[in-house]
Image (cartoon, rainbow, N blue to C red):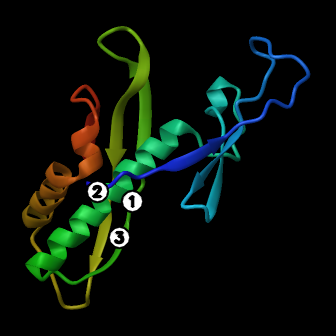
Amino acid sequence: MSDLAVELHWQRAEPAFETGRYSNAHLVQYSKQLELPVDAAPDWGGDAAHTNPEQALAAALSSCHMMTFLALCAKAGWPVASYHDYAQAHLGKNQKGQISVTRIELNPVVRFDTGFTVAPAELAEMQQRAHRYCFIASTLAESVEITVT
């Protein structure tokens, strides 16, 4: 199996390292070609212009789900023309009382080639199959509720 890696770079900018007085802003580097600025979520003092780990988790799930869905549709001969998702991670307390991502909602909108139609029930089943086979969904704890609408 593959080992997939990213590099994370953080450098303190403040003269002293003290609680609540340093920046969490850092860079995550993918494949030596893309650097993504990351910070804490705005509710935790981060820069809203940067992504945060919770968004990155939702993006990973959304992306994996889409790629799995596309593979299943290609195998079934369904001519997907476009796919759009609005993924949202929700924070709450887990069973241990710790703050965690407790729910991720996926809201995919799929368009097919002109003239191709599929029954809503068949589309819903294909989305559920994609969820079952998605690597990221399989990795998340069962305590993380994943909703595909």
Can residue 149 be seen in this snapshot?
no
Report the disc number at residue 65: 2
In this image, 40 relative to 132: left or right? right
Q: How many marks?
A: 3
**Residue bearing the label numbered 3:** 83
Q: Secondary structure at mark 2?
A: helix
Tell me the kind of residue under disc 2.
Answer: His
Tell me the kind of residue under disc 3.
Answer: Tyr
Q: Nearer the viewer, residue 68 or 109?
A: 68
Q: Nearer the viewer, mark 2 or mark 3?
A: 2
Quadrant assignment, res 125:
bottom left
**Is residue 50 shown above or below 42?**
below
Quadrant assignment, res 93:
top left
| Residue name at image x 35 percent, y 39 percent | 104
Mark 1 and mark 2 in contact? Answer it, CB < 8 Å: yes
| Residue name at image x 71 percent, y 47 percent | 49
**Residue bearing the label numbered 1:** 85
Tell me the kind of residue under disc 1.
Answer: Asp
Q: Position of residue 35 (x, y in %)?
A: 65, 56
Q: Assess disc 3: are there few (<14), some (14-19) or many (≥20) residues with their C-alpha within 10 Å of its C-alpha.
A: few
> Real-space Cα distance between discs 3 and 1?
7 Å
Q: Secondary structure at mark 3?
A: strand
